[in-house]
Amino acid sequence: MDFITENWLSILVVIGILSYTVYLSVTKQWTSIREFAYAMMLLAERTFGDKDGKIKFNFVVNLVYRNLPALIKPFVKEEDIAKMIQTLYDTAKDFLDDGVINSSVKK
């Protein structure tokens, strides 16, 4: 207990650095997941063409979920990935209609 009271500042700094490192790792992971999801959306669009959108959506969700990093997978459900994919799709569609993300596309 004396060690903790004597070195509380050093311990706090180490905890802060570790927390920041974990934060950066998770943030980078989500960025790569988002980029992978966009790539899979394009692949689904090219592969399935004008077929049912639900087939393409499920294709993308399944691929993204299966390729999640092992550290993230236990904390994320497939439904969460589906919500994320839908949000990414809506944002991309909104951007593509006029070059600005401004909610101009009706859902």
Image: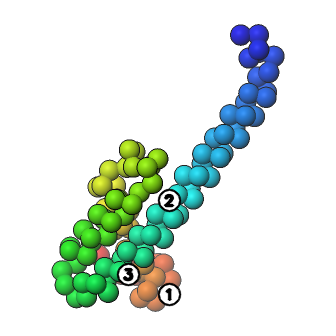
* Helix, strand or loop status at disc 3: helix
Q: Cβ–Cβ below 8 Å for labels 3 and 1?
A: no
- The image quadrant of residue 87 is bottom left
Residue type of the residue flagged with mark 1: Gly
Going by the numbered disc 2, the residue's amino acid type is Trp
Residue visible at 28% across and 84% down? 47
Q: Which corner quadrant holds the C terminus?
A: bottom left
Side (left or right) of 20 relative to 9: left
**Of residues 107 and 49, the one drawn nearer to the viewer in this rendering:** 49
Using a 10 Å C-alpha cutoff, classify the residue at mark 1 as few (fewer than 14 neighbours), some (14 to 19) or many (20 or more). Answer: few
- 47 relative to 14, above or below: below
Residue at numbered disc 1: 99
Amino acid carrying label 3: it is: Leu
Give the Cα distance between marks 3 and 2.
19 Å
Q: Is residue 39 visible?
A: yes
Residue ID for mark 3: 42
| Circle 2 residues within 10 Å: few <14, some 14–19, many ≥20 | some
Name the side, left or right, on which 16 lies relative to 107.
Answer: right
Give the residue furthest to the top: 2
Is residue 91 at all visible to an observer of this figure? no
Foreground mark, 3 or 1, reads 3
Crowdedness near tag 3: few (<14), some (14–19) or many (≥20) residues, C-alpha within 10 Å = few
Q: Secondary structure at mark 2?
A: helix
Q: Position of residue 20 (x, y in %)?
A: 66, 45
Of marks 3 and 2, which one's residue comes earlier in the chain?
2
Q: The N terminus lies in which quarter of the figure?
A: top right
Q: Determine which residue is flagged by label 2.
A: 30
Q: Residue at x 43, y 86 (%)?
A: 96
Residue placed at 46% from the left, 89% from the top?
A: 98
Q: Position of residue 88 (x, y in %)?
A: 41, 70
- Residue most toward the left? 52
